[in-house]
Image (cartoon, helix red, strand yellow):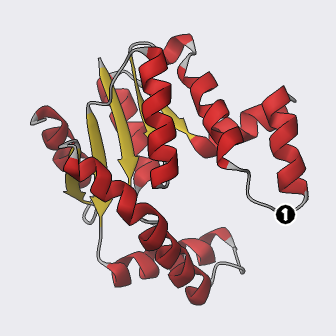
Amino acid sequence: MTRLLIVGPPGAGKGTQSTLISEELGIVAISTGDIFRANIKGQTELGKEAQKYVDAGELVPDSVTNRMVEDRLTWEDAKDGFLLDGYPRNRTQVSAMDEILARLGVELDVVLELTADREELISRLVKRAETDGRTDDNEDVIRHRLEVFDSETAPMIEEYRQRGLLKQVDGLGSVEDVNARIMQAIKSS
């Protein structure tokens, strides 16, 4: 069984690598974005609650996010392992994740951090925004997203480093090269 978190700044390739890791290890890749969309589309109680915040242009509070993640981790496809992308994002959510995993009677095996040069990330994200036609995703917005990542997520990453769970992997290079480095990091843990 393998239970992983994947973290890294926007543009580091988490989504692409999550799919590959999931296929290679035979575990489900769970993105918090997918959890939100599924709950909102399915009109679950949590989805209805989240929709109120989304409609008001507000962030969905941690309490709702935590309950959605816990619910998703109880599904049958997550019993033999999972790769979680997008949660936890801060130290408060790390504490909640600890409680969720304790209730489920499981522990994390590895926290993968994809690292990348800041200017390379900005270049990637600007190109992606142009390709996807996202005019709102300009360089200033991207730099702000990276600053938010640094301030919110860096303390969380440090927490996992202190626990001995963190494996840093260079996220630059071909998809195949990055994936090979990730699989080596997982095997060495």
Residue 175 visible in the picture: no
Mark 1 neighbour density, 10 Å: few (under 14) some (14–19) many (20 or more): few
Question: On the image, numbered disc 1 is attached to which residue?
Answer: 57
Q: Is residue 47 left or right of residue 114?
A: right
Q: If the image is split into quadrants, where does the N terminus sit?
A: top left
Give x and y (percent) for residue 2: 30, 24
Q: Is residue 42 left or right of residue 131?
A: right
Give x and y (percent) for residue 87: 51, 45
The residue positioned 54% from the left and 10% from the top of the image is 76
Q: Nearer the viewer, residue 183 or 94?
A: 94
83 lies above or below 114: above
Give x and y (percent) for residue 101: 44, 25
133 lies above or below 100: below
Give x and y (percent) for residue 53: 84, 53
Q: Amino acid at mark 1?
A: Gly
Q: If the image is split into quadrants, where does the C terminus sit?
A: top left
168 lies above or below 105: below
Q: Nearer the viewer, residue 144 or 160?
A: 160
Q: Is residue 71 left or right of residue 10?
A: right
Residue 65 visible in the picture: yes
Total number of numbered discs in the rendering: 1
Q: Nearer the viewer, residue 73 or 61?
A: 61
